[in-house]
Amino acid sequence: MGYSKKYLPLFIGLAMGAGVFLGSKLDFSNPSAKLFSYNAKKEKLNRLIDYIDYEYVDEINTDSIVDVTVNRILENLDPHSVYIPPEELEGITESMQGDFIGIGVSYYPYRDTISVINTIKGGPSEQSGIIAGDRILMVDQDTLYGERLSRDGLADKLKGELNSQIQLKVYRKGTGIFDVVVKRGRVPLKSVDASYMLKENIGYIKVNRFAETTYKEFKKALDSLQDLGAESLVVDLRDNGGGFIAPALKMADEFLKNDELIMFTKNKKGAIENNYATRNGDFEKGNVYVLINENSASASEIFAGAIQDNDRGIIVGRRSYGKGLVQREMALGDGSAIRLTISRYYTPTGRSIQKPYQNGNKEYFNEYLERYKNGELQNVDSIQVADSLKFKTPGGKTVYGGGGIIPDIFVSKDTTRVGETLNYMLRSGRMGRYIFEELDKKRAFYNKLTKDEFKQEIEIDDDFAEGFLTYTRKRGVDINLKNYRDQLKKYLKAIMAQQLFGTSEFEKIINEDDKMIQKVLSISQ
């Protein structure tokens, strides 16, 4: 920590004063921010920090003191007001901007080399001739093979200035070792995972987060689907934890009529800011289905709430997370920042969907376990609602506030131990490593396959599935998949498609027998 734990109680005792100290460190270049006038308490804390810095008998890392104090203050405000240290801020900013400067490869630190899973279509590496299965041995003069290099450490080596060149030494089976020069470029971080036609008149778009580029990606996908004849649309927001509000508002505007309320916010002074739809919507008449689950939060809930409260579409799935607080990121001047809650948002009918957090952050973030225990992931009747939080939409539909968006049509979750374990393997990367090794055995063959050839020719048989189970047993995971063998095969093929062709092909395979998708198709007849 940089200082002895015996001093911690002393510094935590400064927390209340440090709350004022925070104000003096904020970057108020934001035009909406207000300047603070001179404050004696603030000056008092500044002097105390200086005395500790220059006069205290032992060496103390006062930066660590401030970091600990800031964290403790924010923890006692609400679960979503957080401190972001300098070493994390850059990565978070990149993720929300929607791109970064790099060479455009997905990779594994595999055995003793950096192995390319795939290249970003149209990105710098693909243009330079790098293909899936290549091993990156050296970056400029730095040797990578044989080293235990963290993903962050490797990413730092691959990033750089726009259009700057990087020299790679690469090994390829059947070719040997060769040098290649790659010019760094903008690498997109896609927030639209998939966009395709479910059937002749129903389009599907999956959005994984709300970043700066999300609306642009979504609009491009929407236009393409409409050109293909989409008269109805499925917007999949499952496991979308939110992000920026502005893209969610623009997305909702595509479906709502001019002057229909999307949402409104209210701050500590009671000031209300309304957000209305404009005349710019391009999908104001077709059927809309929004898929949500227990991990759909924040901006996802704003979008789903706007569709539901305006009687514009049907919400399908399970009760969403329940985050109704709005944060603003504020720089602290040393490369760190705080994300501070500045207001609450409300859906068009006036409901807040923020779940309670009075019992502390631990209970708040573990609320999923309560949903699991009380049975609401399997049965809609187990969802606890309060009559005092009942609202009516213009069409007369009853909706509730107080903890997430409750879907119009409920679809249960597979909460069996085997089902949860299999889903974890799908999302955690365990299947990905096995698939990579299998693809690597016949890399030249697989790299030449087209999407259509893959769909028609590649089948996951029992031996392939058993190979994966043997692979996991050797790594300490032994599960009985007697009743899940077909699902396992589908997951393995989906991961294979993802590594060969990208996320959209993964989603197509996973969705073939997805319960929520099947529910939408059944009610859209």
Image (spheres, grey):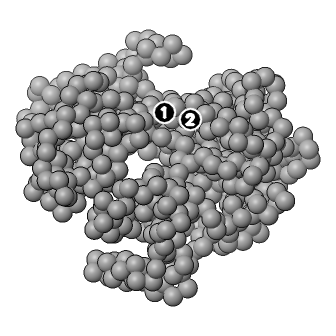
Position of residue 519 in the picture relative to residue 120 (left or right): right
Residue that label 1 marks: 340
Res 55 → quadrant: top left
Residue at point 24% right, 52% down? 134
Do the CB atoms of the residues marked 1 and 2 lie less than 8 Å apart? no
In the image, what residue occupies the spot 45% across and 34% down? 98
- Identify the disc placed on residue 72: none
As drawn, is 238 to the left or to the right of 13?
right
Label 2 CA crowd tier, 10 Å (few <14, some 14–19, many 20+)? some
Which amino acid does the dot numbered 2 rest on?
Answer: Glu
Look at the image and tell me in which quarter the C terminus lies: bottom right
Q: Viewer-proximal residue, 269 or 132?
A: 132
Residue 63 x, y percent position in the rendering: 22, 33
- The mark lying in front, picked from 1 and 2, is 2
The answer to which of 16 and 356 lies nearer the viewer is 356
Tell me if 49 is positioned left or right of 360 in this view. left
Above or below — where is 364 with respect to 442?
above
Is 116 rendered above or below residue 251? Answer: below
Crowd rating for badge 1 (residues with CA inside 10 Å; few <14, some 14–19, many 20+): some
Q: Is residue 509 visible?
A: yes
- Mark on residue 217? 2
The residue most toward the right is 396
Residue displayed at 69% across by 55% down: 198
Kind of residue sitting beneath label 1: Leu
Q: CA distance from mark 1 to mark 2?
A: 28 Å
